């Protein structure tokens, strides 16, 4: 045989070998490297277990990208997500696209090797484009929003702030004579004044000073209300404060040698027959401070939208009423030839607090709202009264102070009638008429006992004796309400 015949025979043998290999390899699944410890020459096929077998529709399922193999997996093992990785007649993911299709077999699911803590809530591990979506932890956990911050942020939504200017009038102390009660036959506006000699000498005419000139009107103030919408209504916190009401009265007839302002004094509770004589000057200064706050929950049981609404409310209320009355008198000092200045100072502090109940009735329209809100507080008054005297009968008396403190039942009645004009969804103009009534409070004009204990060294007889009475304050308010988005 010539060398040409030998070459031709070798080519024919090589073709037969390649043809045999092509017939065998396409009929097998992709081979994996043998596991550690397997006998030499063995090959493990990547066939799915029976529990994971699935027949895809039409037998054609598009392959998806493989995930990195888990730590410790044998070399050459491909890991997949829980998506279908192969179907009838399809190439396996990661297989050479130019190779012939693998043998038909049912698809399989691969495990997920991503920690659950890194998965984005509400987002699949694989996106629609096959991209892996994971959450990378913050480098600084303090940057994350905490539960308290989230709660406060949620509260700010739709919160409304109402700023109001107040113009209120406070009930004046009334027509009270400053001194002990006189005998019924004596006119407190004009009576004869005698000295303390025996026999007595007529000095002139006198009168008892009256508080009818005290007027506590036109008091400016502010009120702030913050409201937070709730699923069943609203929660409101409000506070108000009035500027100090100050009234100063003078005796117009003094100084005089025959006209006197007299402070009558009683001995043992009997009608007054003696008193303090002022011939140089006599002044009365009266001040009032009022502030308070309240919280309430309004239960919205009415259907949403426009129309009439009647909503109950409950809450807590606190009111502080502080008043002071200072009487300052000047008399000629016969022993020294100078002027003796004496002071009777009376002040009261009322802390009234308690739970409230009431209702809010409104007629709601898209452009305006009119309503009324009456409520009652089952309150108690923790009050303190004090009377201080200075040089009452002379310089030897000096300063003498007495106090009284107690708790008494003191309900509060409050009502507001209002109208609101809605300029926009977030801005509203408001105007209201307000009425406030407090039962049983201590006022300085009613907290003084004008007694006479005789001459020094006995202590002065002008001491504290609180007598409770009612008080009201009322007026108008107007302002602006802003609702946060």
Image: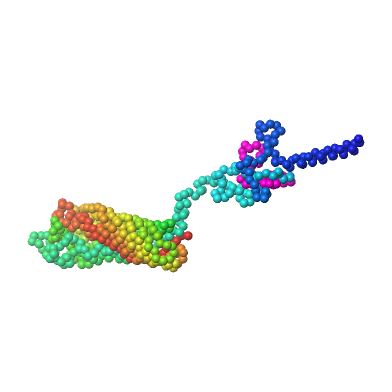
Q: Which residue is drawn at 56% across and 46% down?
A: 119
Query: Which residue, as the protein is rendered here, is positioned at the far left?
Result: 199
Q: What stretch is highlighted in magenta?
A: 69-98
User: Magenta segment, principal secondary structure?
Assistant: loop
Q: Which residue is drawn at 35% across and 56% down?
A: 315
Q: Nearer the viewer, residue 122 or 392?
A: 122
Can residue 345 be seen by looking at this rendering? no
Residue nearest the observer in this picture, 247 or 169: 169
Q: Where is residue 101 in the image (x, y as percent from the top left)?
A: 72, 45
- Which residue is at 34% across, 60% downward? 358
Q: Determine if residue 378 is in view.
A: yes
Estimate the x, y position of residue 437 in percent, counting from the top left. Answer: 29, 61
Magenta-drawn stretch contains 88 = yes
Q: Which residue is drawn at 61% across and 45% down?
A: 82
* On screen, residue 336 above or below 120: below
Q: Is residue 285 left or right of residue 334?
A: right
Q: From what the image shows, is residue 397 above or below residue 420?
A: above
């Amino acid at each position: 045989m010539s060398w040409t015949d030998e070459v031709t025979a070798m080519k024919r043998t090589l073709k037969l070998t390649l043809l045999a290999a092509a017939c065998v390899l396409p009929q097998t699944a992709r081979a994996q490297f043998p596991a550690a410890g397997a006998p030499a020459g063995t090959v493990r096929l990547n066939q799915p277990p029976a529990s994971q077998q699935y027949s895809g529709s039409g037998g054609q399922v598009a392959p998806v990208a493989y995930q990195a193999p888990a730590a410790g997996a044998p070399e050459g093992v491909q890991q997949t997500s829980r998506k279908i990785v192969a179907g009838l007649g399809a190439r396996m993911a990661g297989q050479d696209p130019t190779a012939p299709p693998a043998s038909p077999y049912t698809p399989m699911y691969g495990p997920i090797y991503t920690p659950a803590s890194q998965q984005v809530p509400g987002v699949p591990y694989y996106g629609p484009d096959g991209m892996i979506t994971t959450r990378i932890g913050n480098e600084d956990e303090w940057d994350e929003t905490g539960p308290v911050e989230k709660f406060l942020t949620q509260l700010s939504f739709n919160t409304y702030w109402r700023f109001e200017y107040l113009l209120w009038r406070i009930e004046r102390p009334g027509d009270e004579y400053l001194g002990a009660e006189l005998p019924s036959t004596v006119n407190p506006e004009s009576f004869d004044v005698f000295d303390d000699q025996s026999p007595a000498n007529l000095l002139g005419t006198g009168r008892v000073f009256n508080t009818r000139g005290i007027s506590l009107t036109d008091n400016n103030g502010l009120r702030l209300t913050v409201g937070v919408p709730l699923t069943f209504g609203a929660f409101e916190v409000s506070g108000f404060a009035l500027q100090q009401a100050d009234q100063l009265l003078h005796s117009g007839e003094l100084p005089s040698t025959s006209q006197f302002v007299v402070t009558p004094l009683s001995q043992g509770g009997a009608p007054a027959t003696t008193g303090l004589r002022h011939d140089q000057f006599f002044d009365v200064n009266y001040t009032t401070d009022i502030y308070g706050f309240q919280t309430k929950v309004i239960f919205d049981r009415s259907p949403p939208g426009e129309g009439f609404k009647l909503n109950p409310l409950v809450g807590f209320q606190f009111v502080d009423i502080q008043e002071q009355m200072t009487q300052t008198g000047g008399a000629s000092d016969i022993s020294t030839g100078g002027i003796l200045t004496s002071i009777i100072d009376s002040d009261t502090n009322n802390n009234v607090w308690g739970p409230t109940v009431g209702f809010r009735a409104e007629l709601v329209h898209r452009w305006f709202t009119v309503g009324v809100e009456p409520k009652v507080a089952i309150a108690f008054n923790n009050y303190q009264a004090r009377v201080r005297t200075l040089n009452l009968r002379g310089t030897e008396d000096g300063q003498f102070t007495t106090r009284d403190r107690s708790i008494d039942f003191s309900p509060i009645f409050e009502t507001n009638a209002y109208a609101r004009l809605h300029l926009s969804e977030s801005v509203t103009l408001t105007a209201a008429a307000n009425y406030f009534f407090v039962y049983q409070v201590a006022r300085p004009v009613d907290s003084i006992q004008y007694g006479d204990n005789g001459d020094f060294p006995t202590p002065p007889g002008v001491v504290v004796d609180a007598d409770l009475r009612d008080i009201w304050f009322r007026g108008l308010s107007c302002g602006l309400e802003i609702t946060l988005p």
